Image (spheres, rainbow, N blue to C red):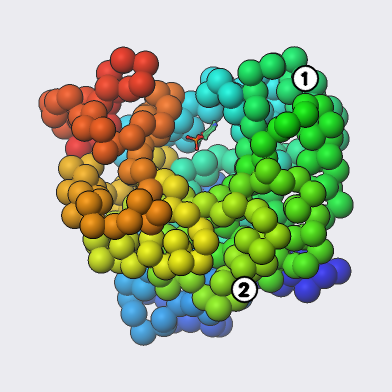
Amino acid sequence: MESWERNLSGRITTLRELENRIELFKEEREFFRLSDAKDFPFSVTDHYFSLIKKEDPSDPVRLQCIPSVRELDVKPYEVNDPLCDSENMPGTGIIHRYRDRILVLASGICAVYCRHCFRRYLPGNRDHRLQEETLEQVATYLKKNALVEEVILSGGDPLLLPDSFLGQIMEALKRSKSGLTFRIGTRVPVVLPERITDELAALLRKFIPLYIITQFNHPNEISKESIHAINKLADTGIVLLNQAVLLRGINDDARILYTLFRMLARLRVRPYYLFQGDLACGTSHFRVNLEQGLRLFRAFDHHVSGLARPVYAVDLPGGGGKINLGDRVIREKRDGWYLIEGNDGKIYRYPVE
Ligand SMILES: *Cc1c(COP(=O)(O)O)cnc(C)c1O
Ligand code: SF4
């Protein structure tokens, strides 16, 4: 077993282990008393846990990984699958919503279950680990669909797969279409940086053009271990991008976002998206009011270099896809909803909250 695998299997997954290491607040204890952990698992790696400043009740790392009873407050418009992934699944493990790229659910687990996760119905479900038969189907799908030029490996976290299986997946996909562009969505550089071994970097190098999209949401998550992992990937020629999620009480502050994006740009991780929260069950305490989000974004939008400026976007509830909120797409505010024009010209609703 490699050391990252030992660290992964030794991560904190129970209330007892957590209580041995940190004094919990009432809202956190309440969650464990009342929740049915089957819904969405809990786990934190040693590395991510070490970034928590224990004396700060609103520590940005703590809020992202230690559950609160507020997760059990499910709003009427919150759903399991807010992006309607299930309506865009032409086969097991494939989400095909945009013409030239498909998303493949490669892994069913994450190292840390982010409390704000919007694909909460996926992670923690081992059934979502790509099976070998499914891999053949994905390869066939790629061969048949001439318009698909890019595969996004997602999940769960694809970099939690063993090197050998990850390599097998990417080989099979690469063989099925020449000139394929790869993308991997992973939070490993943030939560389990020791996973980025020299062997993994050497393996991934074979699949360039490869883009790795990570998720740093706060400057406190940029540790020296993360920087080491990022440098290793960037030095092999992999392009790194970041998708941050706008999170209430964590990074809904223009100065924090500015600092985060500037730090990432300096580390060769280009800020790509800043996401408005999706309407996943039990995540309302993380969402920022949409107009407030726009004000925040505009507060630094003009001042920050294009290299450090992400697109502020929302994935429209009801399957409308991603749209750029900077394009002034809000048409109207009515009866507690913003009416937003999608790329397809249809009107979608997002709650005012
Ligand atoms: C987000 C997403 C993509 C990627 O969209 P980009 O705008 O290219 O980053 C692709 N497929 C699905 C299903 C997605 O949810
Ligand atoms: S790493 Fe991604 S998929 Fe996994 S819990 Fe976090 S946000 Fe969800």
Q: Which residue is at 31% across, 39% downward?
A: 75
Within-10-Å neighbours for mark 2: few <14, some 14–19, many 20+? some
SS at circle 2:
helix
Q: Which residue is at 79% across, 59% downward?
A: 202
Amino acid beneath label 2: His
Q: Which residue is at 33% across, 35% downward?
A: 324
Instruction: Judge whether residue 246 can be spotted in this image.
Output: yes
On the image, the x and y values in percent for residue 347 come to 27, 18
Seen in the image, is 42 located left or right of residue 321?
right
On the image, the x and y values in percent for residue 224 come to 55, 78
User: In front: 257, or 73?
Assistant: 257
Q: Mark 1 or 2 closer to N-term? A: 1
Q: How many marks?
A: 2
Q: Which residue is at 65% across, 53% downward?
A: 238
Within-10-Å neighbours for mark 1: few <14, some 14–19, many 20+? some
User: In front: 48, or 233?
Assistant: 233
The residue that label 1 is drawn on is 143
Q: Is residue 192 above or below residue 177?
A: below
Instruction: Judge whether residue 353 can be spotted in this image.
Output: no
Identify the mark at residue 62; answer none if there is no mark. Answer: none
SS at circle 1:
helix
Q: Quadrant of the C terminus?
A: top left
Q: CA distance from mark 1 to mark 2?
A: 37 Å
On the image, the x and y values in percent for residue 344 come to 37, 16
Amino acid beneath label 1: Lys
Q: Is residue 313 above or below residue 63?
A: above
The residue that label 2 is drawn on is 228
